[in-house]
Amino acid sequence: MSLSIGANNLFNKYPDMVNANLLAEQRANLDNSAVTVYPSLSPFGINGGYYFVRAGLKF
């Protein structure tokens, strides 16, 4: 029997939000890059923490 636990972004960190003035300007210009308040590239993603448990059993 085996048991594994793990996490990605253990402390549930989020990147800094995009500058509100820049976002407002992009939306006023109908810029497609103004669809999210978080940057598209981040070392820990924009979805928060991800946790898992895995169990296995061999006969």
Image: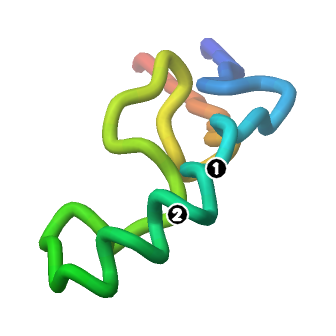
Q: Which mark is residue 51?
A: none
Q: Which mark is residue 17?
A: 1
Choose between 51 and 43: the one closer to the eye.
Answer: 43
- Decide: marks 1, 2 in contact (CB < 8 A)? yes
Q: Residue at x 67, y 20 (%)?
A: 6
Choose between 38 and 54: the one closer to the eye.
Answer: 38
Q: Secondary structure at mark 1?
A: loop
Q: Is residue 4 visible?
A: yes
Q: Amino acid at mark 1?
A: Met
Q: Left of 29 or right of it: where is 9?
A: right
Q: Where, quadrant-wise, is the N terminus in this rendering?
A: top right
Q: Secondary structure at mark 2?
A: loop
- Figure check: 33 above or below 6: below
Q: Which residue lies under the disc numbered 2?
A: 37
From the top left corner, tell me how far across and down residue 11 is, in percent: 86, 27
Find residue 54 and report its image quarter: top right
- Figure check: 59 above or below 12: above
Count of numbered badges drawn on the protein: 2
